[in-house]
Image (cartoon, rainbow, N blue to C red):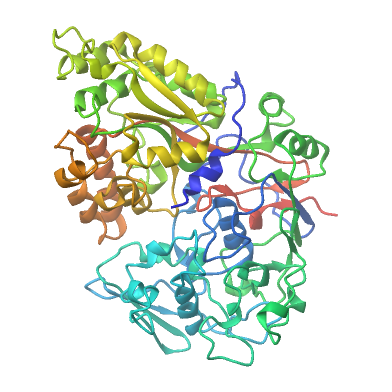
Amino acid sequence: MSRRWILIALATVMAVLGVACGGGDTGGSTTGPSATSAEPQPGGTLHIALISDVQDAFDPQKEYSSVTWEYFRCCLLRTLLSYNGQTTDAGGSELRPDLAADMPVVSDDGLRWTFTLKQGIKYGPPLQDVTVTSKDFVRALEREACGTCNVGGYSFYYSAIKGFDEFAAGDADSISGLETPDDATFVVTLNEPTGDLGNRLAMPASAPIPPLPGDAKERLGAATGHDADWGQFLVATGPYMFEGSDVLDFSKPAKDQDPVAGYSPGRSIVLVRNPSWDASTDELRPAYADRIETTIGGTAEDIALKIDAGDMDLGLDAVPPANQVQQYTTDPDLKDRIHADPSDAVRFLEMNLANPPFDDIHMRKAMNWALDKQGFLQLRGGPIFGDIAGHIMVNSLENNLLLDYDPYATPDGGGDIQKAMEEIKQSKYDADGDGVCDAPECSDVLTMSDSADPYPKQLALLQQVIEPLGITLNPKPLERSTMYARCEDPNSRWALCTGTGWGKDYPDGFTFAPPLFSRSAIGPESCCNDTMVGVTPEMLTDRGYDVVDVPSAEDQINACIPLTGDERVQCWADLDTYLMEDVVPWVPYLFDNDVVVLSANVTSYSFDQFAGLPALDRIALEAG
C-alpha cells in the first residue's frame, strides 16, 4: 500500500523557529486569513511550483497522493459526490452532490445505494458532444478492478461492492453489484453495509470514463489501450483540462495517439479552462483562475525566492524554508500571506505489542507519559507546523469530539517522568518496584527510525527522556521507504518505530482504523498494522513470537463500519479512546499542519480539507 502520508512527509523540516503562531485542530487556517474581504474576481494565471512530479502521471486509477488528488478534485475530474475545497469549519469534510443530482437513496438494510445523475453534463474536448451517463461510472470501476490498470492504486476500497473482487480475479464477466437502469440512474449493491461508500465514490478512481468514439462496446472506453498512460489522455469533466486536450484523437489506435501537450512529465503541467464546464451545474468549484501553470523541479529555497519575487504564487509540495517562515510570521506586512492548516495527518511513535518490553501495557503507557512532545514539535520547526496530539485519529474525522481529549496530558506537552515511573512500577519488567525497568528486555530496544532530519535529533531526545526509566535504544536509522518496509514487517522483530506518520485518504475514520489496527492488515502479507493489534496466537506462532496474548480492536472496528452520520463519527471517537486507554499501540505526538506561503499576487485563498492542500480552484489573483 502506498501511504499518501509519505508524500507529505518527504519535505525537509527546518530548524527551530521561535514563532508563536499555533492554533487549534479545528480545520481552520492558523495563520493568515482564508480569504480577503474583497469579493474574489476570476481571471489571471496561477503559477504553482512542485519539487517532485506527480506519482503516476495523472492516472486516476493509480494515483494515490495528495498533490494529484487536489488537481483531480479542483480542476480535472468530477465525481458523483465531492467536497467544496474548504476547511472543516467551512464544511470541507462534508460530502456533497457533484455529478449526482442529490445525495444517494440508501435502502433500509444499507446494501443498495441509488444515485440519480445531473442532466446534460458534457465531457471536455475533444468529446464535448458526449454526455456523461451512468455506464461511464461502471467503466471507471471496472478499470479500477483491472490488474494492469490499477498497479499501485487503491482498488481495495471497492471490494465492498458486490462482485468487484470476482470481476478483478477474472471469475466474472461484470461487476454484479453495479446496475444502470437508465442513463441517469446508477445503482450500487454492497456485500455488507458500508456507511462510507459515498466517500469512496468521491475518490478519483470513480470519476466517469467516456465511451470510445466509434466503438461504444469497448469495455474501458476512451481509456482502451492506455493501461499505463491514461492520465496523459484524460478527458476532463471539471472546470479545467490539460492544454492541448482539444486535439486528442481517439479515432487512431491507442499506440498512435499523441498525449496532451499540457502535461510534460518531470517538467510542467498546464491547465486551461474546459469550455464544456457549466458553472451552473457545479456549486463546489468557483474556478477563479483562467489558467494554472505548474513548474516541476527545483528546491524549497528556489521556490521561496520566486514566491518572494512574485514569479511563483505558491509551492504545493515544499515546506517553506525556516528563514522565509520567520520573515512572514513576524512582519506585519507579510503575515497574511502565510497559512498553516491541519493536514489531517498525525505523527507518532509505534510500539510492537508482541515484542518485549512493549507487550506490557504499563510500559506502553509509560512511553506516553514520558515523551517530550513539545521538544519533538520544536525540532520540527515550532508551533506553525502543527499541534501536540493527544490521541490517534485527527480531529476532523471525529467532528472535534475529542478536541480536548488527552489521557496522557502533561504541562506544555513536555512529558512527566514521575507518572511514567508509576506505570513502570505496575509492569512485569520492574522487579523491585522502583519505577525503573531492571529487566534485560529494556536494554538495547531495537528501534527503527527515519534517517532524514529531524528524526535523528528526535531520536536523541527520546533516548535522553527515557533513560531514567531504565530503557536504552538500539537505533537503526534508515532511508524512509526502507524504514516503512521494516516497520510493516513483523519478521523484522523491532520493538519501536519512531519515524512514522499517517494521513487520511478521505474524511472518515475508516481510513485510519482498519489499515492500522485490524487483524487483516498485519504484515508481512498486508499493510499497515505494524503494532500487531488483534494478532491471534496462531499468527504469533507462525511469525516466531513468544508472546501469546495481544489486545484486539476487531469488534470495535467492525461495529463502526455499517454506521452512518453522527453514530459513525461517535463510534470512531469511541474506538480512538479505547485504543488510547486499553490498547495503547502508539505515542501520538503531532497533528501536522500544511504550511504555505503565497505571493503578493494572491487575493483570496482556501484550504482543501479533502486533499490536505491549498484549494487551487479557490485561489484568486490580482486583476490584470
Above-or-below relation of 468 to 276: above
Q: Nearer the viewer, residue 455 or 77?
A: 455
Above-or-below relation of 121 to 65: below
Can you give x and y, in whole percent of width and height, for residue 133 in the image? Answer: 52, 84
Asked if residue 125 shows in the view, the reply is no
Which quadrant holds residue 234? bottom right
Q: Disc count in the image?
A: 0
Asked if residue 463 shows in the view, the reply is yes
Is 509 placed left or right of 319 in the picture? left
At 51% from the left edge and 19% from the top edge, which residue is drawn?
Answer: 457
Can you give x and y, in whole percent of width and height, for residue 442 in the image? Answer: 27, 17
Above-or-below relation of 60 to 364: below
At 24% from the left edge and 42% from the top edge, which residue is drawn?
Answer: 543
Can you give x and y, in whole percent of width and height, for residue 572 in the image? Answer: 29, 48
The image quadrant where one finds the C terminus is bottom right
Can you give x and y, in whole percent of width and height, for residue 435 in the image? Answer: 21, 10
Is 347 placed left or right of 572 in the picture? right
Q: Nearer the viewer, residue 103 or 145?
A: 145
Is 488 placed left or right of 555 in the picture? right
Above-or-below relation of 352 to 506: above
